[in-house]
Image (cartoon, helix red, strand yellow):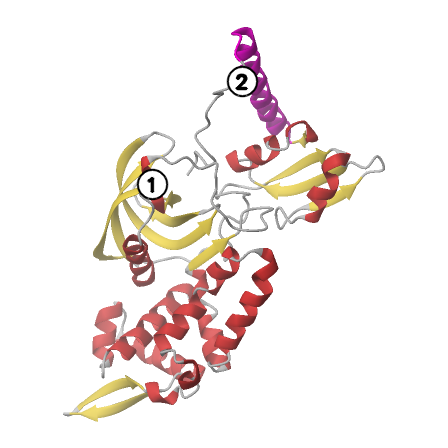
Amino acid sequence: MRNAEVIRQWSILRDLESSRRVTIDDLAERTGVSTRTIRRDLEALQAAGFPLFDEMHEGKKYWTLEQRAFRRLDDTGFTLAELTAIYFSRSLVECLAATPFQRDVRSAFDKLAAALTPGMRQFLDRLPLVIQAKAEPGSQSLGDDPSIPATASRQSAPKSARVGQLLEATLNHRRALMRYHSFSSNREKEYRIEPYRLVFAHGGLYVVAFVPEYNELRTFAVERIVSLSVTEERFDAVDLPPDAFAHSLGVNQGTPERIEVVFEPRIARYINERIWHASQQIEERHDGALKMTLDVCNDWALRSWILGFGPLARVVSPPELVRQIREEADKTRLQYEARRMDGGDGAGGVQHEGTKSPET
């Protein structure tokens, strides 16, 4: 599996860089594969341009990474680990950068990439599949999300140590024990997980993990992880699709459906200016209205997005989504009518829990 292979080869590079010398047997034991697989990995890394060589010491053959061979790093002042770490994070940084600066961010990374050979860049370009960033639909800049309440879980934002634990477990295919506060049930529960990927989406960091107890992939918000410990147990990872949550406007992995929404003329230009989803198709009508067709899953994120446009958006299909949106609109109207009947002035209205998907 290509993803497992590149993660293992990345671990080998880090071991070679941090150790003065290491044997093939040592690398096989650390990565949990055969010595034959390690030899193939070393050959692949050499073919990519990494300066690896072997030498005899006290009758044993050791492998070493020649760091002085990276002469172009002298101009940048970066070590190999620093440069590859920055290059590895480019998908996250490009996502966080505001739209006017994305071109400059990419240019900066291109200059850093010039210190690497084409083979090294090709190898490193596969690493971002492990940690990935997804921009919020329609967003143009990143800022604090005012819709997320300052709850206890929000205040205890994920620390770098916890993210480091998840990265370690993901890269080394190690199971983890996690105590997690569920948004939907509002209680804490313990999980044994096999973490596959970290994803930044909608202002939060999520981990996509396989849960043996349920025999399925699930998505967890890192900020709601109460405790985490990485075990020595290894798991066999499977390749995930390259795009996290490809069929959702939010953080979900549901089955896509054909969705049709008509937008009123006064908001049609705004809708047409933005990319809300890769599957979107736009049909401009003679009256100035606009019909958008999407192939996405009918989840909380989609319904919240449609309801956010109020009377300016109308669902055409599927019928189940029409029914759901109508029910939500009726509930909203009844809340306002109740306030009016009670003589309320609208102050201190209903407080919503935020925009985190209850399905997560």
Which element is circle 1 on? helix
Which element is circle 2 on? loop
Q: Tell me whether circle 1 and circle 2 mark residues in contact (CB < 8 Å).
A: no
Please tell me how many numbered marks the rendered image carries.
2
- For this view, does 31 lie left or right of residue 259? left
- Give above or below for 225 relative to 82: above
Q: Quadrant of residue 164?
A: bottom left
Q: Give the range drawn in magenta.
A: 318-344
Whether the magenta-drawn stretch holds residue 326 is answered as: yes
Q: Which mark is residue 155?
A: 1
Sooner in the amino-acid sequence: mark 1 or mark 2: 1
**Main SS of residues in magenta:** helix
- Disc 2 marks a residue whose amino acid type is Gly
> Does residue 81 appear anywhere in the picture?
yes
- For this view, does 245 lie left or right of residue 180? right
Residue at 38% x, 31% y: name it: 184
Q: Mark 2 points at which residue?
A: 346
- For this view, does 290 lie left or right of residue 352? right
Residue 349 location (% of width, % of height): 49, 20
Residue at 60% x, 30% y: name it: 307
Residue at 52% x, 61% y: name it: 94
How far, Cα to Cα, is label 1 from label 2? Answer: 29 Å
Give neighbour class at mark 1: few <14, some 14-19, many 20+ (Cα, 10 Å).
few
Q: Which mark is residue 267?
A: none
Residue 320 location (% of width, % of height): 60, 27
Residue 298 location (% of width, % of height): 56, 35
- Disc 1 marks a residue whose amino acid type is Gln
